[in-house]
Image: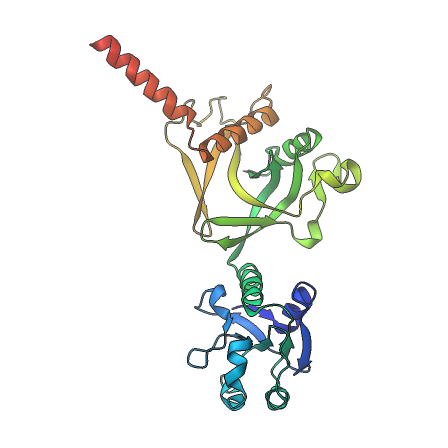
Amino acid sequence: MLQVDVAQLHEDNSESLSLAWVGGRDARTAVRRESAAAAALIGHLNLTHPNSVQVIGAYEAGTIAELADRLFAPAPSAVIFADGLAPPPQLLEGAERTRTPLFTSPLPAARVIEKLATYLAKRLADTTERHGVLMDVLGVGVLITGESGVGKSELALELISRGHGLVADDVVEFSRIAVDTLEGRCPPLLKDFLEVRGLGVLNIRTIFGETAVRPKMNLKLIVQLQRPVQGGVSEAERLPLHELTEAILGVPVRKVVIPVAAGRNLAVLLEAAVRDCILQLRGIYSMREFVARQQAEVKKNGS
């Protein structure tokens, strides 16, 4: 079950929301995402269908003084008084009695809800891991995949030397932060490192500088490196007429397959694939344009 410890929630948002922990400091509660969407776990006071984090603004505060028992009965993960409000003494006592974290914030309730809804959506997002190298190429998140030893790390090193950025090598953590958005990050243990056969583990930040690494990227393209099959004939289509996709956490991602062969400049090919992906995101499809032009020429000559 995905969850966020309330103490961690306070630590991560205390500065941006000016959250002050005024009651229930010894509580050990957590915001859990079971079947509800993460955005539904934070909201204005709702005693009929209580949220996991209750936010009380000026409007709700006018009617809550008599509702202390009802407020804490559903065992909310936390209660936040926004709009610069001070909790009534009976609510402070109720928070201590039920061991419920009680916070205050000078910010408007709507702002607190908006910020925490985004925070919880990311922290409680569906996650998975993929083997490969995640790069920032021309501002596009690209996952380089392929069999072990096919040359993923060498290609990544070449791309870094050409000014692109490394996000993660070997293991990439993906989170679905929106319906159609996948965010890729590097596990803390592997941060900044790239393993290259023959050279060992390289600290990319130390060698190439701060601009050579990225903390995260949204995945837009998967590039699969394909070994040459026996006999030297690749199984990849010369003119792929059908667009390839691969689903990660239910999100379809554009995919291209690049055969690996002696003399091929994989970095240039990958950059070209990224540029074509950018055009596709803008609604420009080179292959469709070529096929349409070819069909028009055939029709012209046949008439």
Q: Is residue 112 left or right of residue 252?
A: right
Residue at image position (70%, 42%) is: 213
Picture coordinates of residue 102, whole percent (x, y) = 62, 80
**Residue furthest toward the left?**
303
Question: Which residue is depicted at the point 60% across and 22% down?
Answer: 265
Residue 203 can be seen, yes or no: no
Which image quarter: residue 89?
bottom right
Relative to 206, does residue 100 appear above or below in the rendering? below
Q: How many marks?
A: 0
| Rendered residue at 62%/83% (across/down) | 87
Q: Which quadrant is home to the C terminus? A: top left
* Residue 120 at x, y percent in the picture: 55, 64
Residue 141 sits in quarter: top right
Residue 101 pos. (x, y %): 62, 80
Relative vertical location of residue 1 with respect to residue 218 in this rendering, above or below: below
Q: Which residue corresponds to the image point at 64% horizontal and 75% vertical from the top-left?
A: 104
Reply above or below: 83 against 250.
below
Q: Quadrant of residue 262?
A: top right
Taking depth in this image into account, of 199 and 102 the one nearest to the observer is 102
Give the x, y percent position of residue 247: 44, 46
Q: Is residue 236 left or right of residue 147?
A: left
